[in-house]
């Protein structure tokens, strides 16, 4: 009997921790944030975020962008326009619902970081996708800058979290000390669940010195615990956990608070752009770009229909066709000594 109770307890603990959702449901809203509203264009897709009820549409640009497939749209769009019937698009589009949570928005409301909570029709659980909007572009790879010293005296008298940073590099950061929290968890905004990273790479920035800190997936209880990084001279205090994409990531093992095996680097490994408040740092190639003046379904539909009116020029032959080459001198010589040609010429002469 004791063994049975122990096994039941063991499986209860295991299954209660497996697949745990670390997102905060009360913070999500179905209303599309102002910075996200409109049509966004990428190399392989068009996305629409519109309306208080979160109308979402996705147009996939297939066949090397020569055909726009209306892959995902809500049921109300079917009343506006009929769908093409072909062997590329599905008969029924994916009906995907999205809610939004604002992670950060700058004071001028020109840049922000959001987390999308997506409900795919074939999945029971939600999928979460963090993204940042900077300069009219959506980035999936970005950091959020945070102060991490519990005791500001550790940073010295010159420490000022509000100092401005260079947009292109860290060359002016002689006295700046802060933490870049990584939110680059999702591979894309897709019509099927994207790939979510198992690890995040954040950075401690101390002037011109950078300390990469690896965070990995964890099934522990979420808390406000801090972790410590010691470089031989200073002790840096930073979050032990990062909550991103509905997952929890940690930088230490078990209950430990010591970060180990961290090596200092002198050059930041990526180029980035920052918002006006120097709070969001986006890096890599932008995922999507805003299409100016757009905000409803008719506009994304017009873009798709206009693109589908194009016709691809005929492909060049694999083996180029050469122009025929006639060797006229050899042909003439053959005709001269050809009996039939000789007789015909004599007849023509004596007519």
Image (cartoon, rainbow, N blue to C red):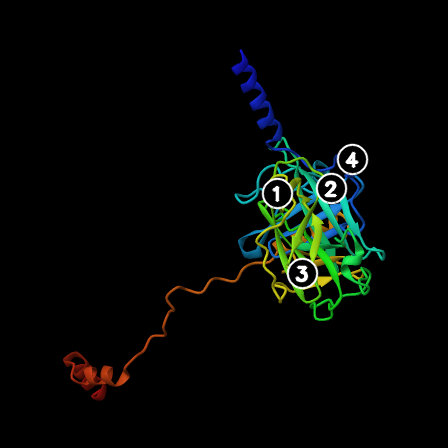
Disc 1 marks which residue?
A: 191
How dense is the environment of label 4, judged by Cα within 10 Å: few (below 14), some, or many (20 and up)?
few
* Residue that carries the numbered disc 4 in the rendered image: 26
3D distance between C-alphas at marks 1 and 3: 49 Å
Counting residues from the start of the chain, the first of labels 2 and 3 encountered is 2
In contact (CB < 8 Å): disc 4 and disc 2: no
Q: Which residue is mark 3?
A: 233
Q: What's the distance in space between the residues labelled 4 and 1, CA to CA? A: 25 Å
**Label 1 or label 2, whichever comes before in sequence order:** 1
State how far apart marks 4 and 3 are (Cα).
42 Å
Q: CA distance from mark 1 to mark 2?
A: 34 Å
Foreground: 118 or 171? 171
Q: Nearer the viewer, mark 4 or mark 2?
A: 2
Q: Which mark is on residue 224?
A: 2
For label 2, the SS is: loop
- Image depth: mark 2 or mark 3 in front: 3
Please provide percent x and percent y for residue 85: 58, 42
Q: Which numbered disc, 1 or 2, marks the residue closer to the eye?
A: 2
């Amino acid at each position: 009997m004791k063994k049975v109770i122990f096994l039941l307890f063991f499986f209860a603990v295991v299954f209660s921790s497996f697949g745990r959702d670390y997102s905060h449901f009360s913070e999500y809203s179905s209303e599309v944030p102002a910075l996200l509203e409109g049509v966004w264009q990428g190399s392989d897709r068009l996305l629409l975020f519109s309306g208080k009820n979160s109308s979402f549409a996705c147009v996939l640009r297939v066949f090397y962008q020569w055909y726009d497939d209306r892959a995902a749209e809500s049921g109300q769009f079917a009343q506006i326009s009929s769908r093409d019937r072909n062997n590329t698009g599905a008969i029924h589009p994916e009906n995907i619902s999205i809610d939004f949570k604002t992670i950060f928005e700058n004071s001028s409301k020109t840049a922000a970081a959001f987390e999308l909570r997506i409900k795919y029709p074939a999945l029971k659980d939600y999928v979460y996708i963090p993204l940042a909007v900077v300069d009219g572009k959506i980035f999936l790879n970005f950091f959020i800058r945070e102060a991490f010293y519990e005791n500001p005296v550790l940073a010295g008298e010159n420490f000022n979290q509000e100092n401005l940073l260079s947009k292109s590099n860290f060359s002016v950061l002689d006295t700046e000390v802060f933490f870049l929290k990584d939110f680059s968890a999702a591979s894309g905004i897709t019509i099927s669940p994207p790939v979510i990273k198992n690890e995040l790479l954040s950075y401690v920035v101390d002037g011109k010195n950078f300390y990469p800190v690896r965070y990995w997936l964890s099934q522990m209880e979420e808390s406000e615990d801090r972790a410590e990084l010691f470089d031989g001279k200073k002790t840096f205090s930073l979050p032990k956990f990062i909550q991103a994409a509905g997952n929890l990531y940690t930088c230490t093992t078990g209950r430990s608070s010591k970060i180990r095996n961290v090596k200092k680097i002198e050059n930041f490994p990526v180029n980035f752009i920052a918002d006006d408040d120097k709070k969001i740092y986006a890096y890599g190639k932008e995922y999507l770009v805003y299409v100016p003046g757009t905000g409803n379904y008719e506009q994304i539909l017009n873009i798709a229909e206009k693109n589908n009116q194009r016709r691809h020029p005929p492909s060049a032959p694999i083996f180029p066709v050469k122009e025929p080459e006639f060797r006229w001198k050899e042909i003439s010589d053959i005709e001269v000594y050809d009996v039939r040609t000789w007789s015909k010429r004599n007849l023509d002469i004596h007519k």
